[in-house]
């Protein structure tokens, strides 16, 4: 039996892409850095707003809700997360996600 979470409650917004986001891979988690502008979420304490779908000509398409995947060492269940030491980790002040799949350092989650 095959299960799938893809497409669940998926919503997308477009933002101005900061220069540092140029060439970023789809799935990169992004943060709001200025008015209508996003950049890669990587610094300690960064709370992501969504997952990069694409970046072209200075415009970023960001998935802000639904199912996404990223690298993290989290078990299935609810977690409040932010970046620490360059990785997504538990945080009291972060964003809540629901991890539905966890396998070898990669998670599938609902935001």
Image (cartoon, rainbow, N blue to C red):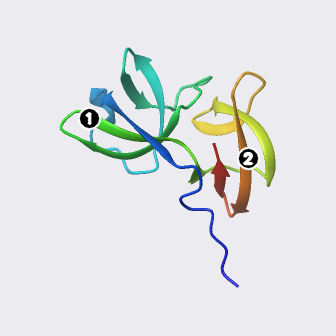
For mark 2, give the secondary structure: strand
Residue 64 position in % (x across, y down): 51, 38
With respect to residue 106, does 20 lie above or below? above
> Residue at point 40% right, 51% down?
26
Is 53 placed left or right of 109 in the picture?
A: left
Is 38 placed left or right of 75 in the picture?
A: left
Mark linked to residue 104: none
Mark linked to residue 98: 2
Residue 76 position in % (x across, y down): 79, 55
> Residue at point 46% right, 23% down?
32
Is 57 placed left or right of 38 in the picture?
A: left
The CA span between labels 1 and 2 is 28 Å
Q: Are marks 1 and 2 in contact (CB under 8 Å)?
A: no
**Residue beneath disc 1:** 59
> Residue at point 70% right, 85% down?
1
> Residue at point 65% right, 56% down?
107
């Amino acid at each position: 039996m095959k299960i799938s979470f893809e497409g669940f409650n998926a919503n997308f917004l477009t933002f101005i892409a900061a220069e540092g986001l140029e060439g970023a891979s789809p799935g990169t988690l992004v943060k709001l850095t200025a008015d209508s502008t996003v950049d890669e979420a990587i610094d300690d304490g960064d709370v992501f707003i969504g997952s990069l779908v694409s970046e072209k000509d200075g415009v970023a398409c960001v998935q802000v809700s639904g199912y996404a995947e990223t690298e993290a060492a989290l078990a299935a269940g609810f977690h409040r997360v932010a970046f620490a030491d360059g990785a997504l980790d538990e945080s009291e002040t972060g964003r809540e996600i629901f991890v539905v799949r966890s396998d070898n350092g990669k998670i599938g989650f609902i935001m």
